[in-house]
Structures are given as structure tokens and as C-alpha cells.
Amino acid sequence: MVKCSDKLSREQLSLSKNVQNKQIKKVGKREHHLWKKSNSSGSGKKALSLVRIVSDLPNEKEAVYKALDKWVAWETEFPLAATAKALQILRKRSQWLRVIQLAKWMLGKGQGTTMGTYDTLLLAFDVDKRVDEAESLWNMILHTHTRSISKRLFSRMISLYDHHNMPEKMIEVFADMEELGVRPDEDTVRRIASAFKKLRQEEKQKLVLRRYMSKWKFVHFQDERVRMRRYLSEDEDSIN
């Protein structure tokens, strides 16, 4: 009876320790989750504060940069998350001059060198008709990030040149895209085909459409996904 009692006591003690360990792990997970939420909320508040600061400033670059330097002066680390969120808020509000100023300031600090930042800045240059600045940025991106440039960024630059009626430049970007093995989306294919047409290079126009444009599309019909032949334009139909 004594041995049985000792064994039962050891089993109860082991079970009690296991329960305690599980409870400790659950508390740890909960604390980690709360810390993440608090941090995210903090960067969001900082972002809104930054947007208010720059929105109330005059348009002079010096005044904006001075205010941004003051905003970041007491930070132990560069507030990258808050700055990136502020950039997206300004983009949604179509405050393109502020987008350009904030992005340039951030990149000048060596921060935010991502495809997302470059995409936002190229879009702002496009809307603000700063083609020369967009071209300088694009050349830097090509030189620095040759093998990691996203399809979206190539498409952004091609659409920028398209908006400003520069078909030769569009084809230059497309040539880099092909060389790096980045397959264009269908909107970009149409833009490039149109550029070749403007330059009266019909054979290359047909070649681009034949190589990259899908002959099929998928539509939803009676709750099913159905493949059907695409209705082609005259230019697209002429290659078949």
C-alpha cells in the first residue's frame, strides 16, 4: 500500500508540473501577442502625427527637411515603420509633393530602400510630371538592384513613359525586362505593342503579342470557372 501511495503521489506531482508548464507557455504567447499590437499601434500614431506635421508646412524643401529632422532627432532608431505608413497615407490622399519630399528624405537617410518605396516615388514623379527625376531614380535602381527588380516596378516605369508619350524609352525598359527574365503582365504587353505600332515596327508588335499575350481567359459562369477564347483586337487578331 505504501509503494502504491508513493507511485500515485509521484504521478500527481508530475501531472501538476505539466499543467503549470502549459499555463506558463500560454501566458508567454499572450504577452508576445499584446506586445506586437502595442508596437503596431504606436507606429500608426507616429505616422498620423508625421502626416499632420508635413501637411501643415509650406512647400519649400528646406522647411520640410528641417521639420523631418526635428521629428526624428530624439529617436534612438530611425522610425522606419511609422515613416513608411505615413508615406502610404500621403499616397492615398494624393499629396504627391509631400510623397516626393518624404521619400527623398527617407532615402537620403539610407532608409526604406525597398521596391515599395521606389514604386510610390516613381508614381509620384509620374503624376507630378518629373520625368527626368524618375529616369535618374530608375537608372539608380537598375544599377543597384539589377537582379531583384520586381515586375511591378518595370510596369510602373513603362506606364510612366507611356503617359508621357515616350515609346522609345518604353522599349528600352522592356528590353531590360526581357534580358532579366521578368515576364510582363498583359497590360504591359499591350503598352509595348502600342509603342512598337507608334514606331511603325509592326513585325515586332506582332511578335510581342504572339509571345506574351494569352489566347485564353477565365470567366465565372453559373458559379463555375470557365476557360474561353479571348476576343482579340484587330492588331491581336492579325497575328493568328
Image (cartoon, rainbow, N blue to C red):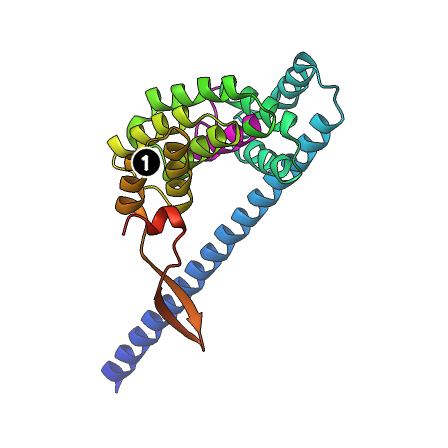
Give the image location of residue 104, x and y in percent.
54, 21
Question: Could you tell me which residue is drawn at 34 percent across and 31 percent down?
Answer: 174
Task: Tell me the quadrant of the picture where the N terminus can be found.
Answer: bottom left
Between 21 and 187, which is closer to the camera in this rendering? 187
Q: Nearer the viewer, residue 219 or 233?
A: 233
* Residue that extends furthest to the bottom in the rendered view of this protein: 1
Q: Give left or right: position of 87 versus 233.
A: right
Residue 193 drawn at (x, y percent): 37, 38
Residue 214 higher or lower than 103, as above or below: below
Our reading of the magenta stretch's main secondary structure is helix
Query: 143 or 166, which is in the foreground?
Result: 166
**What range of the chain is rendered magenta?**
108-125
Crowd rating for badge 1 (residues with CA inside 10 Å; few <14, some 14–19, many 20+) = some
* Three-letter code, disc 1: Glu
Q: Which residue is depicted at the point 52% across and 33% down? A: 120
Q: Residue at x 35, y 72 (%)?
A: 15
- For residue 199, what is the image quadrant? top left
Element assignment for label 1: helix
Against 106, is 159 above or below? below
Rendered location of residue 150, percent (x, y)? 36, 36
Q: Which residue carries the number 1 mark?
A: 202
Residue 162 located within the stretch drawn in magenta: no
Whether residue 122 is in magenta: the answer is yes
Residue at 48% in and 51% down: 32
